[in-house]
Amino acid sequence: MSKAFFVTGTDTGVGKTFASCAMLEAAKSKGLSTMALKPVAAGAEIVDERKTNEDALQLQAHMSLELPYEQINPVVLDAPTSPHIAAHIEGRKVDASRLLGYCRGALLNRPDFALVEGAGGWRVPINNRETLADLAKLLDLPVILVVSLKLGCLNHAILTAEAIANDGLTLAGWIGNRVEAEPMEYESEYIASLKGALKAPMLGGLPFSAKSAPVEAAAEIDLSALDL
């Protein structure tokens, strides 16, 4: 059995990587082999004389398969901005078909549970013609949506879910992530509204990440709705 999912968010900075790492840990706790990819990442730093991205390093640290960094994050761009702008600054070309090739090659490892994490939200551009949604469509994977639990999340989540459906893909589940230290007002009512509006199961509600690690947050994740 090998199952793969595309992870997107309602916006940038909503905790996609934190949620992905928590899911990887939850899957590992069930004895499953795990892998995660970050096909394109904008925002680089030099680690051990190599250009890397912090999100990709986090994914690498929490997956069970041992893969070279370059396979996990084949395209890393310097500027912490939209990928199409970062690529233009560097004079590089990023397109969905090339990213698809990288992903398909890595997915040949066939772990029990694999995640392909996007950058930003569903319609983030990677060039003047394509967005990361085009990669998701080429991969034809079910989607897991990370929702930041804050004012405005209902509109962002519903619009993203509609876009995913309009692109012909299945929303397999969603995760609520607390992005602020103080719980949002009327949080339980917002979660109830999200459960009613999103035609997919809630896989978990994650604590504010500054106070928890993905290993601890994994206890809040239920992957059974994904048939794992």
Image (cartoon, helix red, strand yellow):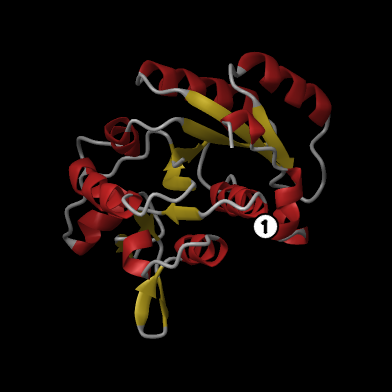
Q: Is 65 located above or below residue 126 in the figure?
A: below
Q: Quadrant of the C terminus?
A: top right
Q: Quadrant of residue 189?
A: top right
Direction from residue 85 to residue 29 in the image, left or right: right
Residue 196 position in % (x across, y down): 68, 14
- The secondary element bearing badge 1 is classed as helix
Direction from residue 149 to residue 52 in the image, left or right: left
Q: Is 134 located above or below residue 154 in the figure?
A: below
Mark 1: few, some, or many residues within 10 Å (few <14, many ≥20)? Answer: many
Direction from residue 146 to residue 37 in the image, left or right: left
Residue 128 position in % (x across, y down): 20, 39
Q: Is 122 located above or below residue 59 in the figure?
A: above
Residue ID at (44%, 42%): 2
Say which of 100 and 54 sits in front: 100
* Tag 1 residue: 214
Residue ID at (46%, 46%): 115
Residue 120 position in % (x across, y down): 45, 44
Q: Is 128 located above or below residue 63 in the figure?
A: above
Residue with the most extreme front position = 1
Residue ID at (41%, 85%): 48
**Can residue 73 be seen?**
no
Amino acid at the residue labelled 1: Pro
Residue 203 position in % (x across, y down): 66, 34
